[in-house]
Every structure is written in C-alpha cells, then in structure tokens.
C-alpha cells in the first residue's frame, strides 16, 4: 500500500519535478517507509512506500525496467502475484525483486492491457511506455484503491489523494454543481468520474484510461458483473448457494494473507467481520490480532458493540484489543479526521475508523475488514421493498436519498439551484443492461457506485492516514460475481444477507448471527449537542462560509435551532452534512 503521483506533459515541455515531489510528500502518511521520484522525458513519477511485500530496496518505486522500456508507480496489493511470477518466469522473464510491483511490469509487457484480467487484488497504478510515449491509468474492479487526476491538452497529473493533487497547483477548484447535488442528496456519494471540485476527476472502478503522446485519450471499462441468475443457476438450491458462498469466501480471506508482515482483523462484532475471523481461524491462523472500538452512549443509544466482538474473540482465542473513545477525544480529533479525507465524507463511521486505525497501526500494518457485505448480499433495509416491483427509482430514492429535490432548493443559495441530478443519475444507472429486476438494479448501483464512494473510500482514507493497509475479502471480485448471481430471494429474507448468515452458522457462533443489525455508532455526531453543536455553529457562521454563500442562511438557522429534528432516512444529521462540507473546504484552503 502506498501513495502515487505524477505528471506527464504533451506540449514538449518538461514535467515539473518539484510539483511531483510536493504531491508525493503530501502523501507521507500513506507511505511512511520511503519515497522516490523518477523523471525521464515528458514523464515524472513520485511514490511513497509502505513496506508490506518484499521489504527490501529492490521493490523500491517508481520502478523502471530499462530492458522493457516500462516505468510504473503502483498502489495496492496483487494477491496472486506469486502464481503470476512463476508463469512469467516460465515464459523467460527474469526478476530483480520479489514483490508484486515488478510482476505488473512483466505482465504488462507479456500480455499488454489485457493483463488486468489476471490481476487479483486491489490496485491503482500508472504505467509509462517509453517507446510509444504512452501512459495508462488503471483502477481495480471495485475501486478499492483511489486514483485522482486532472487532464487537459498540456498535461496529465495524477495522485492517490485529492489533497495531494492540489499540491501540484493550477487546478480549477470551483465547486462542481452536479457533484454538489449528489453530496447533499445522494447520501454524500459523488459517483466517478466527478469530485466535488470541477477541476479534479477520479478514475472509475474497473477502468483503464490510456493517454497518447499528443494528449488524446481513450477509456475502457474492463469488468462488469451481471446481476441476476445466469444459465444453469436454476439447478442450484439454497444449500448449493451456501456451499459456494463459503468456498469463495475461504479463498478470498486466504488470498489476503499474502504479506511479509502479520495480518490482523478489524472486528466490529457483526456477522461480516466475525466471519472473516472465523474463516481465518479455520485456515489455521492462531494468535490472530483483532481490534474493536466503542464510543460514549447518548441517551439510550449505545456507542459500542463490545459484547458481540468479545464473543468472537473468546471463541477463536484471538489476541483482542478494545479501544474505548470518550467524547472529548472524538471532538479533538475531528479536524485531523477531516484533513485525512480525500473528499468530504459525511458518515459518522469516519471518525471511528480514524481513531481505530491510529490504535491498530501501533500493533500491525495490515488488517482484513468486513466492508462490502451489506451491499453485495443485500443487507440494507431498502432492498426488500425493491422486491415488489413498482417504481424502482421512487422506492430507492425514498429510502436512500438524504433530501428530495424540493428540499435541495431550500438548502442551497439560489445561485446554486439546478436540475435533479441525483435522481437522473440513478435513473440512468437503473436503465443499464445486465440487471433486469428492480432489486438487482439497486444492488448493482450500490456495489458499483455507493460502495466505492462511501464505505470503501472511507476505509482507505482513514486507515492510510496511519500507514495501515486494509484488505476487504468481501470485495474479492469472485465473491462479488457470485453474490450478483445468487437469486434475491436467498439474500433479502429475515433482515438481509440471508444466504450469508445461514452459511456462516457452520463457522461462527449463532450469538453474533441472530443479533440485531448493528453499525459503527458515533452518537455524538448524530445528536449534535454542547461543544459539537458549537463547533458546527462556528463553522457555518464563519466569515469564509458567509462569503462562500453556498447555503441558504434561513435553512441553516432552522437546522441550528433544532438539529435533532432534522435526521436523514439513513439516520444521519442534516446539519452535520452541511458543516462537514464547509469544514473540508476550509481545511483545504478553498
């Protein structure tokens, strides 16, 4: 896991190595173990390294292979790199390192862009072909690793984080009006390629963007799962689907053990992370380090789930660590948490993952996490209504959107009024082929869009703030492909994830399977009171906020007068959403 950056020019000028170095330095937390800059002709690459695989200097990046005429900067992990390495050696390739970075270089030379189909893992990279003066930006199938860029007729700049890209300067930092609508309506999800800033884009998942020497480009989506049963699936019964679910999950967690350092688990006490622990124990892992976090309660709303994580820790005899965070620390660390966000992320989970990552990074450098199961196995409350047919867009919008368009016109200053962009986006996505039923359309949207730009981005940003690599076995592309095929009737019953829960009974105690559905609770950011409310009031009435003129002051005053009366359908604070965006903009100096 690392941070990558670079600049490629198309107008005959040399890239600005100083700017590349500045972008690279901004990502020091992502890669605290070393850095490098490599420049040749119109190309300059930068890299920050987190040593996980091949701890020697031979795996240093940027990695240049003069014999092949290829240069690479890479962020992520290729879990099947040992198998690919052996195959490439059989083809006559010789290696000077023992990690996965060089395997990508050789694989590209051997198979060209089609090599991406052979890569099992999470990855974002830029590869430079010296002979053709051609660059390729590539992102993994589920967008687990981020990749931001700015492309115009003169140059390409890219980086693993948006703040790093800003360090290069010269970007249009005005607010993208469509992205603004998504942020305030589509539960803060800003789908790729947009970001909240007009001059910055992010590469969509499963995408290869190739840029020629003259600056022209072409984009290709190289993977898209089909949602709904496929020919032959009608022969499988519920027991068969359970068998296949466990089999593919076993492979996924075992793949994510590849490392030259110990691998731990973020254990919330829910079904998903508990199953990961159970499957690792089943695979022979002993003394596994597990980590849980809890917060102070607010009124009757509990702030931890230790009782469930303790069941798993005891059952599998893990080396368990509990971290309890009092409200004062949550408040004091919020500015640092927001500074770690590549984009504004309103979820209360962010501060939880930030503080948990800080503690976990003191013990291990790699963890597995249960993120993604709710989206691919239908664990959310808005999926069962989608089984009934009817108006799929209206059903989804009522459950997921934070505001309808009428309220959007209330929250924004009239200068920022526009069309109902979020509803239009969902309508277009639902109309795409390879998902016939409403439930499958919703699962596809959440897997390919919401998951990428909410929970996955959150985990990457917060863990990498402390040089901690998070691996997500539920987002193994084979797991996602299988889950997409399983009939919805086997996923949505009894609160969702039915096939996963029933399969998990063979591995983990029933006490964590039959419990009420939980989440990562941070009550203080839902019920804004005391110093939290004062912090929000200060931000939204600050001179910079007033001069920006983004929000309608009357709407802001209404929320400030009674924050707890304005909660979104997904149990978030509408006031916190506004304050988070303004705080992020101020933090970035925008």
Image: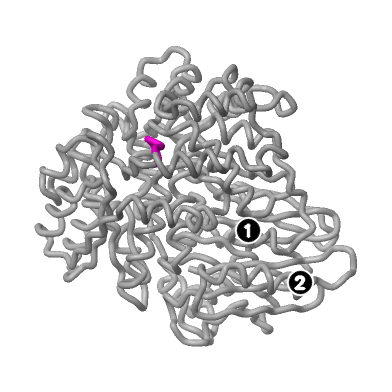
Which numbered disc, 1 or 2, marks the residue that appears first in the sequence?
2
Nearest to the observer: residue 367 or residue 548: 548
**Neighbour class for label 2 at 10 Å: few (<14), some, many (≥20)?**
many
**Pick the front one: 573 or 494:** 573
Q: Is residue 92 visible?
A: no
Q: What label does residue 43 carry, if any? A: 2
Q: Nearer the viewer, mark 1 or mark 2?
A: 1
Element marked by disc 1:
helix
Q: Give percent across and percent down for residue 64.
A: 65, 80
Residue 348 against residue 83 in the figure, above or below = above
**Crowd around label 1: few <14 · some 14–19 · many ≥20 (10 Å):** some
From the top left corner, tell me how far across and down residue 353 is, in percent: 38, 54
Left or right position of 201 against 118: right
Magenta residues, as a range?
Answer: 525-529
Q: Toward which corner of the image does residue 532 lie, by quadrant?
A: top left
Task: Establish if 322 lies above or below 425.
Answer: below
- Would you name the residue on which mark 1 appears? 163
Q: Is residue 124 visible?
A: yes
Q: Main secondary structure of the magenta part?
A: loop
Instruction: Name the colour scheme.
Output: one colour
> Image height check: is 148 above or below 559?
below
Say which residue appears at 34% left-offset and 32% top-offset.
380
> How far apart in space, not on screen, are marks 1 and 2 (Cα)?
21 Å
Residue 382 occupies quadrant: top left
Residue 465 covered by magenta stretch: no
Q: Residue at x 54, y 20 (%)?
A: 404
Report if the CB atoms under discs 1 and 2 are less than 8 Å apart.
no
Q: Nearer the viewer, residue 291 or 124?
A: 291
Comparing 363 with 218, the one in front is 363
User: Which residue appears farthest toward the right when viewing the image?
Assistant: 12
Write the residue at 48% across / 63% down.
465
């Amino acid at each position: 896991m690392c941070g990558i950056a670079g600049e490629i020019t198309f107008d005959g000028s040399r890239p600005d190595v100083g700017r590349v170095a500045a972008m690279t330095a901004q990502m020091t937390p992502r890669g605290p173990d070393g850095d490098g800059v490599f420049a040749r002709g119109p190309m300059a690459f930068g890299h920050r390294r987190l040593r996980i695989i091949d701890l020697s200097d031979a795996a240093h990046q940027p990695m240049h292979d003069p014999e092949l005429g290829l240069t690479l900067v890479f962020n992520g992990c290729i879990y099947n790199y040992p198998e690919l390495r052996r195959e490439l050696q059989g083809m006559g390739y010789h290696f000077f390192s023992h990690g996965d970075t060089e395997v990508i270089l050789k694989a590209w030379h051997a198979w060209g862009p089609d090599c991406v189909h052979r890569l099992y893992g999470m990855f974002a990279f830029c590869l430079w072909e010296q002979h053709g003066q051609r660059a390729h930006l590539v992102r993994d199938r589920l967008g687990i690793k981020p990749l931001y860029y700015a492309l115009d007729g003169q140059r390409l700049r890219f980086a693993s984080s948006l703040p790093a890209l800003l360090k290069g300067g010269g970007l249009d930092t005005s607010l993208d009006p469509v992205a603004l609508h998504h942020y305030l309506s589509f539960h803060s999800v800003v789908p790729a390629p947009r970001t909240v800033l007009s001059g910055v884009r992010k590469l969509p998942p499963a995408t290869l963007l190739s840029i020629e020497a003259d600056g022209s480009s072409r984009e290709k989506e190289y993977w898209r799962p089909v949602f709904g049963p496929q020919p032959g699936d009608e022969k499988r019964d519920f027991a068969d689907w359970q068998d296949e679910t466990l089999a593919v999950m076993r492979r996924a967690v075992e793949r994510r053990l590849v490392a030259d350092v110990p691998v731990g688990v973020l254990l919330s006490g829910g079904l998903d992370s508990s199953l990961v622990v159970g499957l690792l124990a089943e695979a022979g892992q002993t003394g596994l380090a597990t980590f849980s976090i809890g917060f102070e309660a607010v009124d009757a709303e509990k702030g931890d789930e230790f009782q469930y994580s303790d069941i798993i820790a005891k059952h599998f005899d893990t080396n368990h660590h509990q971290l309890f965070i009092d409200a004062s620390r949550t408040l004091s660390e919020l500015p640092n948490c927001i500074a770690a966000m590549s984009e504004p992320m309103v979820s209360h989970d962010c501060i939880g993952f930030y503080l948990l990552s800080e503690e976990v990074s003191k013990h291990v450098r790699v963890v597995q996490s249960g993120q993604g199961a709710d989206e691919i196995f239908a664990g959310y409350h808005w999926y069962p209504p989608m089984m009934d047919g009817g108006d799929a867009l209206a059903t989804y919008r009522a459950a997921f959107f934070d505001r309808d368009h009428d309220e959007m016109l209330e929250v924004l200053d009239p200068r920022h009024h526009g069309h109902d962009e979020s509803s239009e986006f969902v309508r277009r996505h639902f109309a795409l082929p390879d998902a016939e039923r409403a439930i499958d359309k919703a699962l596809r949207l959440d897997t390919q869009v919401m998951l990428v730009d909410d929970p996955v981005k959150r985990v990457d940003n917060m863990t990498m703030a402390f040089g901690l690599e998070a691996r997500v076995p539920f987002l193994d592309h084979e797991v996602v492909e299988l889950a997409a095929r399983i009939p919805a009737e086997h996923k949505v019953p009894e609160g969702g994830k039915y096939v996963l829960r029933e399969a998990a009974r063979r591995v983990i105690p029933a006490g964590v399977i039959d419990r009420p559905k939980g989440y990562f609770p941070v009550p203080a950011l839902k019920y804004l009171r005391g110093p939290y409310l004062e912090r929000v009031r200060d931000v939204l009435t600050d001179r910079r906020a007033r001069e920006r003129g983004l929000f309608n002051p009357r709407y802001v005053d209404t929320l400030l007068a009674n924050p707890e009366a304005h909660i979104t359908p997904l149990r978030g604070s509408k006031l916190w959403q506004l304050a988070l965006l303004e705080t992020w903009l101020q933090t970035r100096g925008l």
